[in-house]
Amino acid sequence: MGNRRRVAERRKTRPAVVGGLIAVAVAGAGLGGYALYGAGAAADDRTQNTSAAEDQKPKVKTSPLSAAEVATTATTFLTSWQQGKVTAAAAATSDTKAAAALLTGYTKDAHITGVTLTPGTRTGGKVPFSVKATVTYKGISKPLAYASSLTVVRDTATGKPQVDWTASVVHPDLKDGDTLVTGESGTPPIKAVDRDGGEITEDRYPSLGTVLDGLREKYGKKAGGKAGVELRVIRAKDSKSSDKTLVELSKGTPGTVKTTLSPTLQAAAEAQVAKRARSSVVVLRPSTGEILAVANASHGFNTAFQGSLAPGSTMKVVTSSLLIEKGLASADKEHPCPKYFTYGGWKFQNDDKFEIKGGTFKASFARSCNTAFISQAGKLDNDSLTEQAQQVFGLSLNNWAIGVPSFDGSVPVQSAAQKAAELIGQGGVRMNPLNMASVSATVQSGTFRQPYLVSPSVDHRTLATASRTMSSGTLSQLRELMAYTAGYGTAAEAMSGVYGNVGAKTGSAEVDGQKKPNGWFTAYRGDLAAAGVVQAGGHGGDTAGPIVAALLKLGG
């Protein structure tokens, strides 16, 4: 999920193009307004005198693609596809077998006919194009229109230009292994409603498109509806995404699925993430595990439920519970926070290389001192953090059943420097806002309750549980740490104005190739817990913090 230039050989005639292609190409605007053949083509392709041995060895082009090569390859592929010449179209790609299968299914299984493909403006090797067609099934027809793109690359083995094949070339909602099918949907539509009975739609709540897809896939048959006729994306068997409806030819009768979402909090969550690019947030009720809101600034993937990201220092909530339980730290006892600490061959440091001399563990937690945690790595077993996350916080067991697809977090057993990095939410640890909201909910209530979007009474599914709870002493200290951080630590600015029984933790997670870290924030107030992330946003207190705090102010 290169812009190289090479001028093609001059030819006396142009390849034939048809339908939606010919008008654009002849007018000189085809494939972005560039000529199919440049004036310098012949000169660029002149061969130099070589030895007899070199002449016998086939030459493979490695030069950048020319505009003419991109145009010719794209035109060949699009024209062949438009004319229904699947073999010719597939031959112009990097994966003939996969291309032929999907293009064949485009007509045979998806029942798409009358295809017109119109290229747009080329950018390097990338050529956007629009698609207009008709979906017809048992006498019912509906128009189909969408935009897609292809990228022309040079085959490293032959030197020939070809379309770099991915399923998304055929339709942007397709991933490799997915298929397009038109017919009577095996899954009836649903009418999802919030906890107050109000209908949930994607128009009303843009973040919930993927949630609605997941609800339909799981509960469509159970909710009592009747299937309609649709063009759908059927996901690959190993995909974690839900099937998706592209065109509805005839309506089915929806069944009703009630969710735990709060209309007030959901609307507020949508408004908050709209202010920050690449932001996601989840709000829970700790006393029950009910999910009250979920929102993502980007609507194509549900990062809030399915993201897999290093949580940074928000993971220190879990680590602190472990250190306190094992007698390696205590809220009000002195605890080391040096500028640097080396473990497993890695030299760890604090943000801005600060140190706290003679400070308590509470001070280190509130200021998010990395070395205060790294310094304890040698006193822990390789599986200590993994067991704590699983046994107390219900994470990393891959057994949550919230009602739609979700990722339950991952805390793998690691050793040496990677073990130390996991203590501060780096290394192999992976979480999402749902997981980290659950962590705060566990601290607030004292017991892990698996989050859920649909009540288990609807389908009698079993919710995940944790095998043990924290001792009252550990829990009391952990709440003290989070309350102090909310009032006086790195979370204080964001939590200003959030009153009552509160606790919070900030986090920043470094990501390779990313200038700014992912900013994390997890907190609770009364009977609300929430967590958010802003990818490539910077420090959590400044980015995700205001989103979470704004939602906590609405209730608790």
Image (spheres, rainbow, N blue to C red):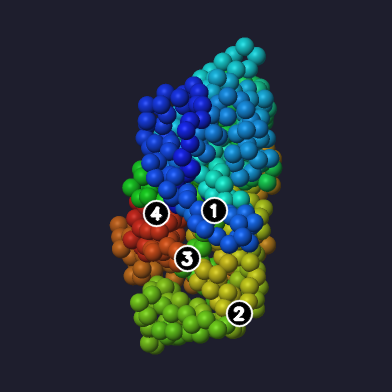
Q: Is residue 194 found left or right of 546 in the rendered image?
A: right
Mark toward the start of the polypeptide (3 vs 2): 2
Q: Nearer the viewer, mark 4 or mark 1?
A: 1
SS at mark 3 in the image: loop
SS at mark 4 in the image: helix
**77 w.r.t. 247: above or below:** below
Which residue has dot 2 on it? 416
Q: Looking at this view, is 345 or 334 the one in front?
A: 345
SS at mark 1 in the image: loop
Type of amino acid at the residue the image marks with label 1: Lys
Q: Is residue 275 found left or right of 25 in the rendered image?
A: left
SS at mark 2 in the image: helix
Instruction: Bin the neighbour count of mark 4 within 10 Å (Cα to Cα): few under 14, some 14-19, many 20 and up.
Output: many
Type of amino acid at the residue the image marks with label 3: Asp
**506 w.r.t. 26: above or below:** below
Q: Tell me the residue at 59%/55% (across/down).
A: 59
Mark seen at residue 61:
1
